Amino acid sequence: MQIEHRLQHLGLTLPPSPRLPTDVRLPFAFVRVAGDRAFISGHSAQDVDGRVVGPFGKVGADVTIDEAYTYARQTALSMLGSLSRKLGDLDRIDYWLRVFGMVNAAPGFTDLPAVINGFSDLILDVFGPEAGQHARSAVGMAELPWNIPVEIEAEVLIRL
Amino acid sequence: MQIEHRLQHLGLTLPPSPRLPTDVRLPFAFVRVAGDRAFISGHSAQDVDGRVVGPFGKVGADVTIDEAYTYARQTALSMLGSLSRKLGDLDRIDYWLRVFGMVNAAPGFTDLPAVINGFSDLILDVFGPEAGQHARSAVGMAELPWNIPVEIEAEVLIRL
Amino acid sequence: MQIEHRLQHLGLTLPPSPRLPTDVRLPFAFVRVAGDRAFISGHSAQDVDGRVVGPFGKVGADVTIDEAYTYARQTALSMLGSLSRKLGDLDRIDYWLRVFGMVNAAPGFTDLPAVINGFSDLILDVFGPEAGQHARSAVGMAELPWNIPVEIEAEVLIRL
């Protein structure tokens, strides 16, 4: 339970299962496991009840870069929540592989890496530079579901 | 030939090889196989002759959400066509892994998951909840090739 | 050293490690290796000193399609530079798998495949049709970091 202890030490709490509005249907898995590979669906930040939270809107216009950094960091916690429920134990995560960071970018907002750093910094802080290291892209989308400012998907290697 | 039967039972027909306009050059594989992994290039809907079809334009403005749902569903059939030609037998698909659903989104159109559900619903219907389950993101792009309303790429696990 | 010879034969030179502006922090790996899999972060074109280069802006408005094709080609060289530094020898690349080509698209610019062909053509030219073949998507983003016209991420299979 090393990762759980690390989270506690950092004062971080994982949100519960996503609680969706009644008119939203998401017919897919938040985490899909095949052998030693776990694919993680696009995640957003969640509140303590599991609801998708804001601030909503375009980064660089409605949402500041600092708010977006924090949002990306909270998105990492949502993802760890999903991984924890799926894998039983976060210590089964051997290795982060790929992170695809999507920013709901206002026209002209190009400091996309600084936003997704919120995600990378948390993952590296929790998993360390060996397991937590990852390949990454940080890019600007035209729209994201429910007008969330950031959505991130990933792939990790797990222990069987 | 379980999947072929299932498609027949559902009254679904797969389109033939993509037939491209003469000025279009696509120097890549629609499906790339390495060991038990198959990577599937971005696909669109095709007509019975293999041509890329519309309705073209931005979802939420030129294309309705229902039309886009149907388009995503037809995109799944295009993908199954490519997989069938590459693998010989769709029963070789063991497990869907990752689906990346891209919507040509009009400004302010954020109901992207409802569009890509057309793809997920069909895959789950044809492959069942075990093999058909997948991780997914559904996001809004600024532009897509030929102004198609939806483009989807994926990865599946196959039997050797 | 087959690939190195091939590059020399084609008169191609790989740029050195990315040299970033002092205010930019990229806390991730340009290439992440796990077993026989190498995930490659989003890359751009670089100059002979490793700096991210332009032409900057939207393809179809600020940047022509020919310039963008060349940029995608140079992005392949940046990626080969990162792979060379990580793997020691580019001959360790067995098989290209997935290429995700992102174009900083001006409104209405949809000829995205023609841009990313610059990348695919170079990879196929250097690695040949067997190892160089790949699955691909070529799509239009709302914004890219530093307003680069093209960003490409990929995955390759490597020899252990």
Image (spheres, coloured by chain):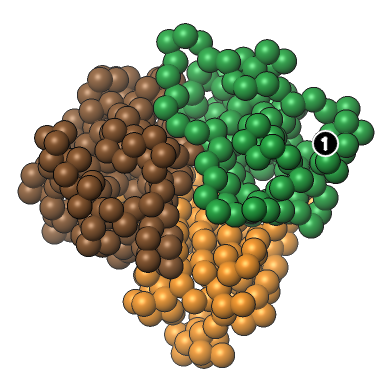
Chain colours: A orange, B green, C brown
Q: Chain of mark 1?
A: B
Q: From the viewer's perspective, is B36 left or right of A105?
A: right
Does residue A30 lie above or below C121 as drawn? below
Q: Nearer the viewer, residue C103 or C147?
A: C103
The picture quadrant where one finds residue C102 is top left
Residue C115 appears in view: yes
The picture quadrant where one finds residue C92 is bottom left
Q: Residue furthest front?
A: C2
Residue A15 appears in view: no
Q: What is the secondary structure assignment of the residue under circle 1?
A: helix
Q: Residues within 10 Å of mark 1 (few under 14, many from 20)?
A: some
Say which amino acid is labelled 1.
Glu
Q: Nearer the viewer, residue B87 or C146?
A: B87
Residue name at image x 55 percent, y 73 percent? A158
Residue indicated by mark 1: B4
Q: From the viewer's perspective, is B91 left or right of C80?
A: right
- Where residue A115 sits in the image (x, y, percent)? 37, 56
Residue name at image x 62 percent, y 82 percent? A89
Q: From the viewer's perspective, is C131 left or right of A27?
A: left
Residue name at image x 72 percent, y 15 percent? B48
Quarter of the figure with the C terminus of chain C: bottom left
Q: Residue furthest right?
A: B9
Residue name at image x 92 percent, y 33 percent? B9
Q: Nearer the viewer, residue C95 or A108?
A: C95
- Where residue C76 sits in the image (x, y, percent)? 27, 41
